[in-house]
Amino acid sequence: MNQNIQHFFRLTYLTRKFNIDKRKLHYSAKVRNGQLTREDALDVIKKDPYTGGMESLDYCLKKLDLSYDEFDKIMSDKPKSFLDYKSYFNLVKTFKKPIRWGNKIGIVPDTVYKKYFSFDI
């Protein structure tokens, strides 16, 4: 994937559509290492991360074969969850108690239980 599109995806799509700001991880590490104060990091995070301008937006939309209207619709639609799609999730959930029981007696490894069944949705 082109670097411009990655930058656009990370700083525009993820932050504006899903409220996922990857900069938080980066600046958290800098605060922990003493390279930046917490207040300075919060000031940077409050600013809009996307500084690419209209040329970059035009380029990315052209590469993604999207019009402005299609992009605006995507950005304004409510984010979807994996629960909005057909899956075996409900079937897998029915096995939670037997898997937990198997984990307690040592048949099912901890990693399997923690990876697939230690969540509540």
Image: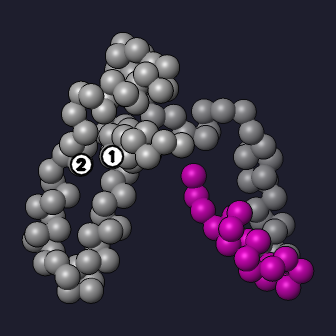
Image quadrant where residue 50 sits: top left
Q: Secondary structure at mark 2?
A: loop
The amino acid type found where label 2 is placed reads Pro
Residues at marks 1 and 2 touching, judged by CB atoms closer than 8 Å: yes
Mark 2: few/some/many CA within 10 Å (<14, 14-19, 20+) = some
The relative height of residue 69 versus residue 27 in the rendered view (above or below) is above
Side of 104 where 79 appears, left or right: left
Spatial distance from mark 1 to mark 2, Cα to Cα?
Answer: 6 Å
Q: Which residue lies at the image location 64% right of the left edge and 67% below the top edge?
A: 118
Residue highlighted by disc 1 = 11
The relative height of residue 102 versus residue 69 in the rendered view (above or below) is below
What colouring does the structure picture have?
Answer: one colour
Side of 47 where 26 appears, left or right: right
Q: Which residue lies at the image location 17% right of the left edge and 68% below the top edge?
A: 41
Residue highlighted by disc 2 = 49
The relative height of residue 70 versus residue 113 in the rendered view (above or below) is above
Residue situated in front as seen by the camera: 44 or 95: 44
Q: Which residue lies at the image location 76% right of the left edge and 62% below the top edge?
A: 96
Q: Position of residue 65 (x, y in %)?
A: 49, 20
Residue range in magenta is 103-121
Residue 9 in view (yes/no): no
Give yes or no for residue 27 being in the magenta stretch.
Answer: no
The amino acid type found where label 1 is placed reads Leu
